Image (tube, rainbow, N blue to C red):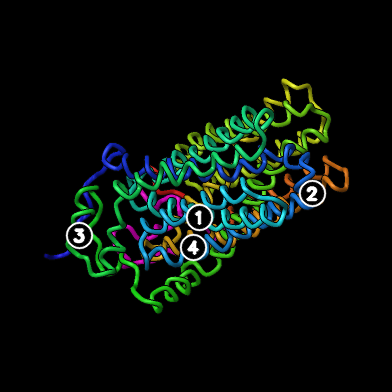
Amino acid sequence: MAVSTTSPPDRSFRVVAPVIALCWLAVFFDGMDVNIYGATMPHLLADDSLGFTPALAGTIGSWTTFGMLIGALAAGTLTDWLGRKPLVIASVVLFSSGSALCALASGAAMFGTGRFLSGLGLGGLMPIGLAIVAEFAPPRRVALTTGLMMTSYHAGGMAATGIGLAVAPGHGWRWVFWAGVLPALIAVPLVLKWLPESPGVLFARGRTQRAYAVADRYRLERPGAQQAPQAGPKGRMAAITALFAPGTRWATPLLWIASFAGLLLVYGVSTWLPELMRATGYSLSSSVTFLMVINAGGIVGMLIAGRTADRFGPVKVSALWFLLTAVGTFLLRAQLPLGAAYVVVFITGVWLFSAQVMVYAATSRVYAPRERATGLGWVTGIGRTGAVVGPALGGAVLAGGDASLGFTTFAVTAVLGAVAVSLVPLFVHDRRGLGTHAAPALSPDAAPGGAERA
């Protein structure tokens, strides 16, 4: 059968809703597992059997994010070889197993091993989910669909905070981590039954008719050699070296820097916001509630950012959101009245988390389809160094007794992210001959009505 050379039929959210819903569920559990650590932090520090100190807790948080770094780099490179679906399942099983190990931990070393194992799965899931959304989403609604999927991360964070508040005081922190085993029981069977494999991956593995069937079912463009990733180890290496091709050579490190800044903020704040607010003068219950409030802001922010980015471009939105994050985190240095503090934390959440997600949306537009999963894997993976630094940095600041310095550091990091992502369009050049869904030029005229603007 000849490969279709025409544009794919228009597809709506209704057609791809089952795929987006499965990604939403998987990332929901990702967000829950990440935020469980911050939600239980006061109880972990109070448990003498673990021997936690703020500095040690920060180090263990960094072990988690170091595992995420490895997981993201591995998944971004292996997903075109092994397939999206098997790696989604493996990622969920890994972070569920890590949560179980934490629940059974008899000391800090065993607990840290569990968090590292969780990190491998958590890091691997995110770039795969983003690649699936970029491939299946309606072409002019990729940023909105990415933001919609990422609301699940913050819904999971809110769920973790709620479980921590409801369960940990009366039953202990271990039961909160047992809740982290649920993804393997709930998400894995659903993914096995309903998540389709990438048509491009199927085509690259020689399953041409199956690739066409999946593409036709979800109204995607039928894959050809230019849309499918190259097979074998040489193909994996070619996908990595393509990130530094003439059209994206300098954009790639800028995306890495923006992702570093964004993930330092996301994981630094998620891990240490309750303790930073306590050090500023708020009560324990109020401090933990701030984590739920900032995640609620994150959900609202994803929807606003996604819709806005589809109109004005993810680069512009990400840069502005980073700058607004800097303002919000700097304001938190002062001990505001409780009601005002909740408002500032909520509004900061609107900007903080979606600034990072719009870096991912921009990444999806920079790279061609055959390089997209690898590009997303490396942007999230290299960015995880920020996630490693964030929790350790927060622990070091708290150990020094200066909470205001922590908020100032987050504000400066947000400015760095804004500068890096705003420079990306200057170094991206249109790459012709890569097929209908090639990486578009990041210029204001890239598509009618600005739908593909950066």
Q: Which residue is mark 4?
A: 428
Residue under label 3, please give it.
Answer: 210
Q: Amino acid at mark 1?
A: Leu
In front: label 2 or label 4: 2
Query: Mark 2 — residue?
Result: 51
Q: Amino acid at mark 3?
A: Arg
Disc 1: CA contacts within 10 A as few (<14), some (14-19) or many (>=20): many
Q: Of the residues tagged 3 and 2, which is closer to the observer?
A: 2
Q: Position of residue 175 (x, y in %)?
A: 60, 37
Depth check, mark 4 against mark 1: the one in front is: 1
Q: Secondary structure at mark 2?
A: loop
Q: Position of residue 241 (x, y in %)?
A: 47, 74
Tell me the distance, in whole angstroms, between the alpha carbons under discs 4 and 1. 36 Å
Decide whether residue 90 is among the magenta residues: no
Whole-angstrom CA distance, mark 2 to mark 4, is 50 Å
Type of amino acid under label 2: Gly
**Where does residue 127 sit, x and y in percent of width and height?**
47, 55
Q: Nearer the viewer, mark 3 or mark 4?
A: 3
Q: Residue at image x 37%, y 68%? A: 81
Quarter assignment of residue 301: top right
**On residue 94, which mark appears?**
1
Give, as a three-letter code, the residue at label 4: Val
Residue closer to the observer: 37 or 433: 37
Residue ranking furthest to the right: 401
Give the total number of marks visible in the rendering: 4
Range drawn in magenta: 424-448
Depth check, front residue: 68 or 56: 56
Within the magenta stretch, is there residue 425? yes
